[in-house]
Amino acid sequence: MRALGRDGGPATLGWVVLTIAAAVWTLTSFGCGPAPVPATPPVTRPVPPAVTPGATAPLHEPVTKAAVPHVTPPASESKARVKQVRGQLRPSGRWLAYPDGSRFRWRGVTGFMLNEQVSSGREADAVAFLAWANRTGFNVVRVLVMLPKGWFTDKDFTPEEGLAALPRTLMLARDADMYVEVTVLANTASLGAKADLGSYVERAGQICAAATNCALVEVANEIFHRTQRADVHDPGILARWAARVPPGIPTALGAPADESGTLVDSAPVITIHLDRSRDRWTRVSRVRALEETSANTHRFVIDNEPMGADETERPKERDNLPEAFFAQGALSRVFEVGSNFHFEDGLRANVPRPVQQQCADAFIAGTRIVDDSYMLTFQDAG
């Protein structure tokens, strides 16, 4: 069994299972007597549990030397669901934080055409999707502001239509207790050279600043994609456009062509689209690389558009194995990075069919493999 080390080599299925098993053992060992004391006392980071059910642990935890971590399990949460939208999120180094400084746990889902549903008068469909997302356990929905001459629909969803609908979309999401990841520029190659893309980003940012539930303004979707205009391929230009978003709103430039994130680390958040061409478990194991990017850049990193779920498997395009999505969610929690559940029906913001629902439930279960009130620190054992 070969672990994924600093050389970025692939991990095996055994490594994925071992990581998840280790996390489960760590949690269950709290109530099963004292843990064995290692021969050499390590440096540990005990994290006190939150005082109130559902709150997150402090962003800054003390570092002490002890033979055994001194951690008290958190009190059991009340049956009533804790409110997710509790004010505008702010970047805080490697994390996003609520206004009171507590940690926000990102559980995102694709809902690309949600804003188009609102624009075209199909609010009932948008409300149904948001209710489903909240009920399933998600707290962020990723929407596209525009999709001119869209590539997966026959819609010509223009920037002006999208910006006009965005305030209402944010309001509906807030009513559903959901934050929104706003991806502004998509399919811009069809707009022509005269379209002022920077103004679209600025206006979207102003709309987000007037709301209380904007989790992220992502300047562009897949910045090097052939459907984007040539200037969108320039991270320097993207950074200038991002600077036009009001201060305090989390921003990301967009996913680069590779998985390192170094081209887009001028923004406080980095979005990555992991390569889907690898075999299933090697692909899933690449979540570990996102932790390395976060540690190197001191940025919050999101697994933004990973392999999507569908009713049937299509190699390199869609997967239908719930266990794979459980592993994705679990590894994102273990490595303390954000993660989105991407799925075929989510492209059109439709409530999923049965297999995709199973995959969504598995993903959420994976993200909860460790209680939210614990902050984990990863150290590469080599």
Image (cartoon, helix red, strand yellow):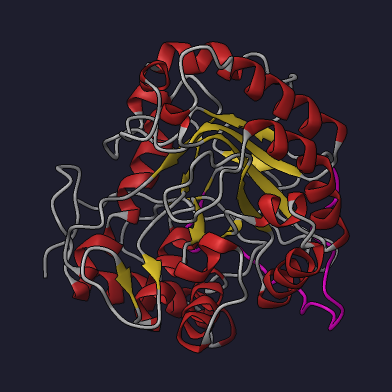
Residue 331 in view in this figure: yes
Q: Relative to 203, is 149 above or below?
A: below
Q: Is residue 304 left or right of residue 278?
A: right
Coordinates of residue 47 in the picture (x, y in percent): 63, 55
Quadrant in the picture for the N terminus: bottom left
Q: Residue at x 55, y 50 (%)?
A: 155
| Region of the chain picked out in magenta, as a range | 65-88
As rendered, which of 101 and 159 lies closer to the eye?
A: 159
Q: Is 41 one of the magenta-colored residues?
A: no
Coordinates of residue 339 in the picture (x, y in percent): 50, 56
Q: Is residue 289 left or right of residue 346?
A: left
Q: Relative to 77, is 65 above or below?
A: above
Coordinates of residue 307 in the picture (x, y in percent): 35, 62
As rendered, which of 228 and 36 lies closer to the eye?
A: 228
Coordinates of residue 374 in the picture (x, y in percent): 61, 60
Q: Is residue 155 left or right of residue 105?
A: left
Where is residue 297, by image quadrant? Answer: top left
